[in-house]
Image (cartoon, helix red, strand yellow):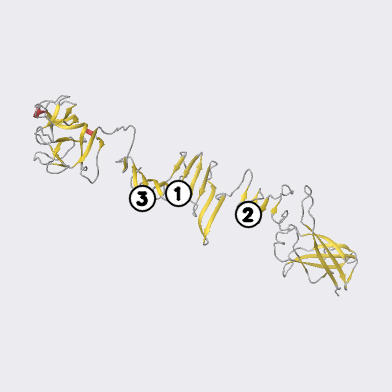
Amino acid sequence: MSRPWNAALFFVVFMSPAAGQTPLGTVISFQGQLKEGGMPVSGSYDLAFTLHNDTVPISAVICKDNVNVVNGLLSVQLDFGAGVSLFNGEQRSLELAVRPGDTGDCALSTGFVPLTPRSPVTAAPYALKVPGVDGHSLDAADGSPADVVFANNVGNVGIGTNSPQRKLHVSGDAVLIERAANDAAVLLRNTLNGQINATFGLKSTGLSTGYAYFTDAQQVGTLFLQNGNVGIGATSPTRPLSIRADADGDYFSLRTTGDSERFVLKMDTTTADLLLVRDGGTERVRFGYDEPAVETAGTIKTGVLEITAGSDIAEPFNVNVKSPEAAGVEPGMVVVIDPERVGELQIAHHAYDRTVAGVISGANGIKAGLTLTQAGSDADGKHLVALTGRVWGWCDADAGGAIQAGDLLTTSDTPGHAMKVMNFEKAHGAALGKAMSPLSHGKGLVLILVNLQ
């Protein structure tokens, strides 16, 4: 037959030791009053404590043997451990079972009478969910320093600071992060509607000197550091800065404060080794190994211009063939003004022609050094014609006699050929320039210093 015991239990604060002493443990002190038939009892009793949730016990039984009760008052200390799983913020209650003392081994559960109702576990100034927590901070294991981890009123967390300025604020000499193989050491993600739309991470490439940053949801490496070299999109940078172009060939862009694209450097995906400089969508400068090596719609200003791949100054003209004897238009042919077509030339076919204009460039491997043109205007055409400078030109030594270096040259009756000036009066205004190489007889190429007179 059960005995009409009942108890009033009180959770009593176990005070923290002073700074420098042993830190607060996990022991909880309980006090209560035990009554039988409504009257306080005195004597020795065995007490069994069990922690419950709403329905079932969740802790092992803590048995206290031969507890001395005086006028109903009892005091015991219970240790449920760190209580990470027991005291998790959910409602808990404490069940107490009683039997007379000296009944036997307290671990034997026979003879215990549970008291009802169970007593609810209420909040206490010290929570044992995490030892060392004082409500908003976590101290070191030995109590010093205090507030190693600190959370302020707005939810910012500080490590090494009790004044965190962001959601996570770390203050100290160093941060050491050890990662598992192939995992990012640091990974920050921004999500929108549950979808990852931006990622920033730091990950070792497997090389002791290399690290890779990631900036998109697919975790494709965009910035690599290796052996002191920086690679943007380049996984193995071999220069202080190596940049790999994107799918459109763009390398980088410069923008105004209004985010308007003003300057873009790119590689043309259709032409090898060609770089374009754009202002917005307008191409301004082109660089490449193929022709043209440099192209711009603006003005080039320089102190000294040295041309190393040509020797004459030329303009492009459309050249017509009106002489039946002329086979066609070839480099080295002498040309004159076409009176029937404005801005165009024709193959020379009369001696001492005062409309002489120059020599078609390109014969014997010498290219035009400087070209003057304006596309789509009267200053445009198909053939480059040397107006001054050195150019190889066709000459007829039989028409005016053997040619020596220094001889003045003019047009001849042989289509496209020059000859030596024999009649200086007729040559006035019809002189093409001077010979710089000889031609003793027949037709052949002569190096001509073009100097129209």
Q: Position of residue 34 (x, y in %)?
A: 86, 68
Q: Are marks 2 and 3 in contact (CB under 8 Å)?
A: no
In the rendered image, the residue lying farthest to the front is 257
Amino acid under disc 1: Thr
Q: Is residue 86 above or below residue 245?
A: below
The residue located at (22%, 45%) in the rendering is 377
Q: Position of residue 388 (x, y in %)?
A: 21, 32
> Label 3 crowding class (10 Å Cα cut-off): few <14, some 14-19, many 20+?
few
Question: Which of pointers 1 and 2 indicates the residue nearer the eye?
Answer: 1
Q: In which image quadrant can residue 40 be found?
A: bottom right
**At numbered mark 1, what does the secondary structure look like: helix, strand or loop?**
loop
Precedes in sequence: disc 1 or disc 3: 1
Q: Are marks 1 and 3 in contact (CB under 8 Å)?
A: no
Q: The N terminus appears in which quarter of the rendering?
A: bottom right
Q: Is residue 199 above or below residue 36?
A: above
> Label 1 crowding class (10 Å Cα cut-off): few <14, some 14-19, many 20+?
few
Q: Are marks 1 and 2 in contact (CB under 8 Å)?
A: no
Q: Position of residue 216 (x, y in %)?
A: 49, 53
Residue annotated with mark 3? 281
> How far is mark 1 from mark 2, CA to CA?
33 Å
Amino acid under disc 2: Asn
Amino acid under disc 3: Gly
Say the numbered circle drawn on residue 417. Answer: none
Instruction: Report the front residue among 22 and 126.
Output: 126
Residue 393 in view in this figure: yes
Say the numbered circle drawn on residue 257. Answer: 1
Residue annotated with mark 2? 156
Q: Position of residue 59 (x, y in %)?
A: 75, 63
Q: In which image quadrant can residue 134 be found?
A: bottom right
